[in-house]
Image: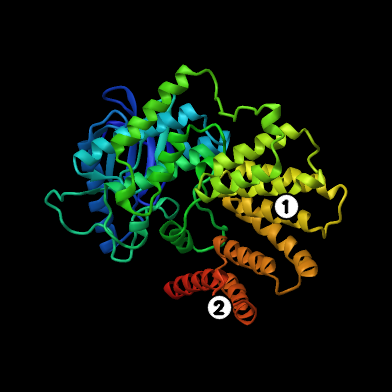
Amino acid sequence: MRGTFEERYELLHRLGRGGMGEVWAARDLQLNRVVAVKFLSSRSQGADLRRLERRFEREARLTARIDHPSVPAVHETGRHEDAGLYIVMELVKGKTLSALVRERGPFPVQLAATIAAQTADVLAHAHRIHVIHRDLKPSNLMLTDNGTVKVLDFGVAAALKPDGDKSRLTKADEMPGTPGFISPEQGEGGDVTAQSDLYALGCVLYEVTTGRPPFEIAPTASPLFLIYQHVHEKPPPVAGHRDDLPPAFADLVMRLLAKDPSERPSAQEVQHVAQTCLRQQSAVPGPRVPRPEPKTEVEAEQPPASLTQEIRRLADRGEHATAAALLENHLRGTRRPLDDPDLIPLRLTLCELRIASEDFTRAYDDYFALGGALRRQRPKTDRDVLTCRAGVARCLAELGQTPEALHEFEALLPVQQHVFGAVDRTVFDTRYEIAALTARGGHIEAARDQLSGLVADQGRILPAGDERHARAEALLARLDRLLESTR
């Protein structure tokens, strides 16, 4: 497509192509400005074409109705004899968040908070006039050269209150949205509300702060499993990926990802938290990570029995982070080598406390460092070495690094079977983790076969009250339901 149409717009170059059509940069010859022109795809026929035309027209109406500086302005709509339906819009110069994540990796805290505040402001405005986006994702958010966030592509947007057109604009078997950013209620086919947009915003903020989306699957896996994860699984805590996120901001992202829409914060609360974070970041030069104050020599040398008693008391009360800080200070005060045999039980306890407090990044670092020190002087079959290897794999899984965690567990399993025996509870735990990670990677049938064998073996060996039965059977049932839904 080249040339001039409507005797006004000179097409310059294509900017992109999507499911509904193409977007071109064009020069408005009448007003001497460069604009974006979106054309409806001409590939569809019959009922499909009519449905797309109505959705295209609705996009133009809803986008124009929003009238917000962070939403591209609609200049004109029409139908061209050859090109069909078109929308002339403000041309946004910048890069999408998805492109920026690929180029730069995780965003600085200040930029992530800016995106949160500006996007939430758009959503608050759109929701006030009863418009929901339904397909918010990094590729639909653009950061302009002057630092403004622009929300693009209201192509699947819908009016919460129909404005004279109550007919459905999606097919009965068509789910609006993108699998990797779809809310649990959308995934289950329920009503889409303003809270669905906020879940998608949580997915966006998770990706720009960590460099990866909340859930990932293998390229060959079915997108249905990605939807299943959003409906049923809890993503790894965002704070586990980096330690410079303000706790309030990390908590905000995870609350946006709540399965229950009523538990998600409002757009106004997102703005408030993000703006507070921005003010704090501006007031403090550079990230500051709070560290526990060092203990005195007397406190550091407290008797191990009293230390163990206090740690147990804190853990029983659920204060795992406090217990970890206490134990960490004691270990620092002893000034003894990492692999000192007398301190290894305490170091392993510290790792478990970090996991219990969801501090997976530091738990990984501790397991990795301790395991490396032990392997320099102990055989690979040493039980403490194997405990560290299992801890590293477990942390990788919690941090969302599925392929790496699966590789670690698969390499660990034969060594555990050799040392502990094939029917040891530790071996059963590793087999479960392998099956769960295989399923997370999208290989559902393989994971189901692994779990079937595990359930049978555990049934022969473990007592009826062991919690491993319920855990494996619950995942097996979930995988059976998922396989049934794809048949």
* Foreground of the two, 70 or 75: 70
Task: Label 1, secondary structure: give it.
Answer: helix
Q: Quadrant of residue 88?
A: top left
Q: How is the image coloured?
A: rainbow
Please state the horizontal and vertical placement of residue 118, each as a whole percent of the image: 35, 31
Residue at (32% x, 31% y) in the render: 70
Residue at (38% x, 45% y) in the render: 256
* Foreground of the two, 195 or 220: 195
Please state the horizontal and vertical placement of residue 98, each as a whole percent of the image: 49, 40
- How packed is label 1: few (under 14 Cα within 10 Å), some, or many (20 or more)? many
Please state which of the two labelled residues, at mark 1 or mark 2, is closer to the viewer.
2
Q: Quadrant of the C terminus?
A: bottom left
**The disc labelled 1 sits on which kind of residue?**
Cys
Residue at (72% x, 52% y) in the render: 388
Residue at (43% x, 60% y) in the render: 232
* Foreground of the two, 384 or 50: 384
Placement of 273 over or under 283, stated as above or below: below
Q: Alpha carbon of mark 1 to alpha carbon of mark 2: how far?
A: 29 Å
Please state the horizontal and vertical placement of residue 355, each as a whole percent of the image: 59, 49
Q: Quadrant of residue 62?
A: top left
Residue 137 visible from this viewpoint: no
**The disc labelled 2 sits on which kind of residue?**
Ala
Q: Which mark is residue 464?
A: 2
* Foreground of the two, 207 or 332: 332
Query: Which residue lies under the disc numbered 1?
Result: 388
Task: Label 2, secondary structure: give it.
Answer: loop
